[in-house]
């Protein structure tokens, strides 16, 4: 079975200021044409964001994968968040159907909220929304649902439904 097409994590470098680059191959377009809802995973850790993206993509199974980008860590490779990395990832993930952003906690959420509020000079893609969900479980729901071509409301709902998943 061929490898799914999606964003690959870039190796952290001290001068890296952009989010991970998407693959050069085009993902399979869902029925009805157009793009898919893009997904951005924002964590304080590059490794956590990239690993969560890989796990979520693996859960898709066969077929094309929606654009998934990890925006973890700071521009100088430390633990933290970077508005520039998040903004760049959202722009790359956008295929015109909206962008779902999942954040791990604290300043990741605050940074995305600032980007969406317009208080920052950067303009986020139209229809960019924060998904209020547990990071890993929400990421799987969002990526799988976006990959089958669902609209932004359905993608957000799938992520937020992860909050109800019981483990006992």
Image (cartoon, grey):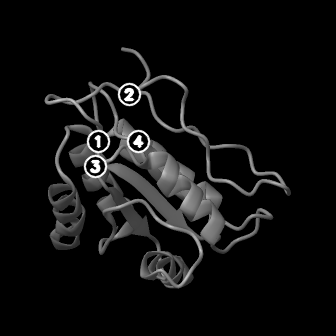
Give the mark, 1 or 2, whose residue is nearer the N terminus: 2
How far apart marks 3 and 2 lie (CA) works out to 14 Å
Is residue 48 at all visible to an observer of this figure? Answer: no
- Which class describes the residues within 10 Å of circle 1: few (<14), some (14-19), or many (20+)? many
Residue furthest right as drawn: 14
Marking on residue 97: 3
Q: Do the residues labelled 1 and 2 touch (CB within 8 Å)?
A: yes
- Which class describes the residues within 10 Å of circle 3: few (<14), some (14-19), or many (20+)? many
Q: Are marks 4 and 1 in contact (CB under 8 Å)?
A: yes
Which residue is denoted by mark 1 in the rendering? 36
Q: Are marks 3 and 1 in contact (CB under 8 Å)?
A: yes
- Secondary structure at badge 2 equals loop
Of badges 3 and 2, nearer the viewer stands 3
Marking on residue 44: none
Of badges 3 and 4, nearer the viewer stands 3
Which residue is denoted by mark 2 in the rendering? 27
Give the mark, 3 or 1, whose residue is nearer the N terminus: 1
Please, is residue 39 above or below residue 153 in the view? above
Which residue is denoted by mark 4 in the rendering? 67
């Amino acid at each position: 079975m061929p490898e799914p097409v999606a964003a690959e994590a870039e190796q952290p470098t001290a001068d890296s200021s952009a989010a991970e680059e998407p693959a050069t191959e085009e993902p399979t377009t869902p029925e009805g044409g157009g793009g898919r809802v893009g997904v951005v995973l924002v964590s304080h850790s590059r490794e956590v964001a990239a690993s969560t993206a890989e796990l979520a993509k693996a859960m898709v199974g066969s077929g094309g994968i929606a654009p998934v980008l990890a925006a973890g860590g700071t521009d100088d490779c430390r633990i933290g968040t970077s508005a520039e990395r998040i903004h760049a990832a959202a722009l790359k993930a956008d295929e015109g159907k909206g962008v779902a952003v999942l954040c791990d906690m604290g300043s990741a959420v605050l940074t995305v909220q600032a980007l969406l509020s317009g208080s920052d000079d950067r303009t986020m893609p139209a229809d960019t929304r924060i998904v209020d969900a547990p990071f890993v479980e929400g990421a799987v729901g969002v990526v799988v649902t976006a990959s089958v071509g669902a609209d932004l409301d359905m993608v957000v709902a799938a992520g937020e439904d992860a909050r109800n998943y019981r483990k006992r």
